[in-house]
Amino acid sequence: MKKNLLVLIVLIPFLINAQTVISQNLNSSNLASTGEYRMQEVFMSLVNNLDKSLYVNEENVIGSKYFIDSFLLGKVFVNNKASKELFAARYNAYFDVIEVKKENTIEILVKALNISCSIAGKLYVYQKYLPNKSDTGKLGYLKVIHDGEKITLLKQELVKYREPKPAKTSLTSSFPAKFVQYENYYFLDNTKDIALPITKKTIYNAFDDSYDTLMKSFIKKEKVDIDNESDLIKLFAHYDTLVNQLN
């Protein structure tokens, strides 16, 4: 990603939670002091570090906490430097953690702004973002789906638990407990540090003024659907083309 991941993790009060307190102790100096960071320092216990408030009895729950259930090969990045070894990893979209299988145990990746993970070639970054219709920023994993010259396009894979609903009468249906999957899209101006949600308003404000007319024309001509991932990738790829041509 075209942003600088050599970041001192100094979080404003509304972003601080139990997990990010752990992150504050893992800065670039103690993870890369000799040029070869100690990989064991970026993993921690799965059981002891999950959000206990999210625990549910999964015995009769339909669906999955994962968009992809399988562990796939990937690498861990600290300060943009890749690990030498490959790891079997998967993203748990319900707990918002990256799980890593190590021999007979599963651990999770420490959440820190300078630590990311590629899984089957897809990069997951721990990123500040502003949810749609919210004034409060959050921290979480977002997947890079287009790494642009000026703007990075990101996808949030989110799973929420839906409580079971018993039938109120004999004429209505009951609904079982289930994990429900959602996808949200964000973009990051590579000169800034917080990702913004994709909306019609933010899309038009995303591009430099000098490209405004050309981008609006492209959106209209190509009938770009901002809820369609392929269209979003095409849109930001076109923006990269304009930037490269006119610079």
Image (cartoon, grey):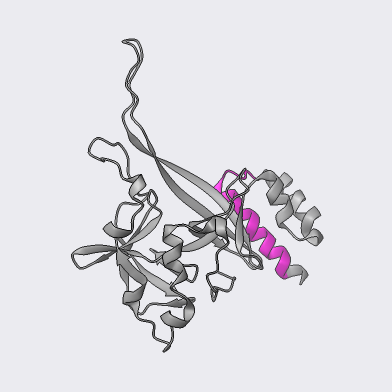
- Image position of 51 with respect to 85: above or below: above
In this picture, which residue range is highlighted in magenta? Answer: 224-244
Given residues 28 and 247, the one toward you in this image is: 28
Residue drawn at x 39%, y 71% as measured from the top left: 76
Residue drawn at x 58%, y 54% as measured from the top left: 137
Q: Quadrant of residue 83?
A: bottom left
Q: Quadrant of residue 240?
A: bottom right
Given residues 188 and 32, the one toward you in this image is: 32
Q: Is residue 35 visible?
A: yes
Q: Is residue 65 visible?
A: no
Residue 119, position in %: x, y?
Answer: 39, 63
Quick check: 236 left or right of 124? right
- For the C terminus, the image quarter is bottom right
Residue drawn at x 44%, y 67% as measured from the top left: 23
Is residue 77 within the magenta segment?
no
Q: Quadrant of residue 115?
A: bottom left
Residue 187, position in %: x, y?
Answer: 61, 56
Residue 217, position in %: x, y?
Answer: 77, 49
Given residues 120 and 45, the one toward you in this image is: 45
Q: How many marks?
A: 0
Characterize the magenta stretch by its predominant secondary structure.
helix
- Image position of 7 with respect to 172: above or below: below
- Image position of 51 with respect to 2: above or below: above
- For the N terminus, the image quarter is bottom right
Residue furthest out toward the bottom = 34
Residue 10, position in %: x, y?
Answer: 55, 69
Quick check: 55 left or right of 28? left
Quick check: 62 left or right of 14? left
Residue furthest out toward the left = 104
